[in-house]
Amino acid sequence: MRPLVRLPGAAPLLLLSSLAVLGLLVVLPLAVVFQQAFSKGVAAYLAPLADPDALAAIRLTLLVAAIAVPLNAVFGLAAAWTIARFEFKGRTLLLTLIDLPFSISPVVSGLVWVLLFGAQGLFGALLQAWGVKIIFATTGLVLATILVTLPFVARELIPLMQDQGADEEAAALTLGAGGAAVFTRVTLPKVKWALLYGVLLCNARAMGEFGAVSVVSGHIRGLTTTLPLHIEVLYNDYDFVGAFAAATLLASLGLITLVVKTALEWRFADELAAFRRR
Amino acid sequence: MPLEIKSLSKAFSRYPALSDITLTAAEGEFLALLGPSGSGKTTLLRILAGLEQPDAGEVRFRGEDLLAAPVRRRGVGMVFQHYALFRHMTVEQNIAFGLQVRPRASRPGRAAIAARVAELLDLMQLDGLGKRYPSQLSGGQRQRVALARALAIEPRMLLLDEPFGALDAQVRRELRRWLRQVHDRAGVTTVFVTHDQEEALDLADRVAVLRAGELVQVGAPNDVYENPASAFVFDFLGEACRLEGVVRDGRLTVADWTTTAPADAPEGPVDLFFRPNEVAFAPADGVGVGANVLAAAVRGASVKIECKVGEQVIELQGLGQVPPQALTRGARLRFTPTRYRLFAAAR
């Protein structure tokens, strides 16, 4: 590690103020969520979670993430590979397009699907004729989630792959490896940590996404409400304990992501250090 | 000849990288591709490896069309400039890679691979480093791992891209000698790229000098050094001094010195090239090219004299035989190049 710049007296002051800000803006609200959820005891906390609608929301959230995250992992890998390894016209445009979901409001990301596939949408009549339902159905939720979480994996991988270059792949080729072997034995292991981080972040966002999903969901209880939407429904019904109980699940998901990330970093510290020292 | 390169050309979008290269290498030969950066030497090496495709030309290896074969079937071992070791694998895994990715039918057994790895670790003097990751090795050690990895597949041809480029001078010299030994023991045809003339001249059986994508001269190191075909080769192959002169009616004139021109000298304006240490000094009233001393540096018996001939500044080297008065700034001295070459000048 590079030695940090030393300013006498400044370090403790900065540390204290950072901790104060983090405590006030992150830890305190999070603590309130748990406090509210358990405010009427453990039984009152567990009851709304056992509700069939809540269980359906949990299942739906997991299903949407289980579809969207792997697809975005594959897309992210492919996009990063294309951008990092090839020079072509429109490369910058592609990079900008990948970033687009970051810069537009999630509500818009939801709305575009309604405009395309909604009853009044561009393909609405056609879909109706075929009896295919996208908006107010799981498909719409998945599409909206994919769009919103599109950049996460690609964004983690692109700078890394650009930095690493393709020499190792070229070396593997000269040593007799075929395309598949180069990918599974060289390219993938080289980026596995960045890929994992990207997937973790992507997953956290996919499960927590509200805006885009809200637009395409239609809020049909037990059918198209994901966990964040379920929380909103309960909250609007003045069921505060229920809302906060469900919220603890989402908050825990964030904490688990953090713990998994830290645990992986700790478990593979040597290997990670070996990568960085290059 | 086992390696035959015929009329090979390659252009990148705008500029030609290689034009009409014809070159051969004998079985077990150590061939150096020498040239400044941008001369196309690395492109040529990458074409041999299969990592680039030429626009025109032919490459045959033991009669077989090498260009038709995909990279993985060429059986060439390549050592990359920055080694390109697999960073997520240990030294042992790196070396074993080429054997492990073979199709099942031709893949050696686990024990055979381990034995081969151990043998290479020993040959490369890497004993005890097998379990380390590349990031835990020094530059010289990484270089040897890269070489071991390339040799593990028992290549038909070994390609080295600036193998010592990233090492410091002392490690470089040591590895150079040792690489030659490894080559002699393995007996594999080797082509290596370098921009360091000393490296090429020391190490190679034959040197091919490239410039701006063209092959300028090929020959044994001493041959090329002693009989450079052009001013560029003379200049590139060692320290060189250049003076402008004129050849007229069999007489060569350089500044205020006139002598009989060699029989094969080109008529008209010429560039006279000589090595800075191949000069004879004379006092100011003697015979030779007159020069004004700008600076002199004495280190033991060797002397470096920076001096001005007309408007041209050159640096001469002397060993003991320099007249003492020539070592003062502003002094006038005379010298004659004892061996020189004349090239027609484009003036």
Image (cartoon, coloured by chain):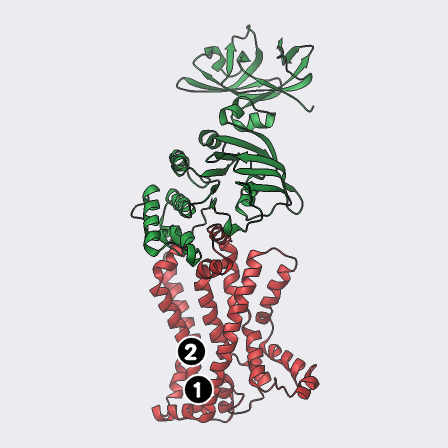
2 and 1 marks on the same chain: yes
The image quadrant of residue A120 is: bottom right
- The foreground one among B109 and B143 is B109
* SS at badge 1: helix
Q: Kindly identify which numbered label has been placed on residue A246.
A: 1
Q: Is residue A206 above or below residue B141?
A: below
* SS at badge 2: helix
Query: What shade has chain B been given?
Result: green
Chain ID for label 2? A
Give left or right: position of A153 versus A6: right
| Quarter of the rendering occupied by the C terminus of chain B | top right
x, y percent for residue B215: 60, 33
Residue type beneath disc 2: Leu
Residue type beneath disc 1: Ala
- The foreground one among B221 and B65 is B65
Measure how far apart labels 2 and 1 are at the Cα level: 11 Å
The chain coloured red in the image: A
Q: Kindly identify which numbered label has been placed on residue A253.
A: 2
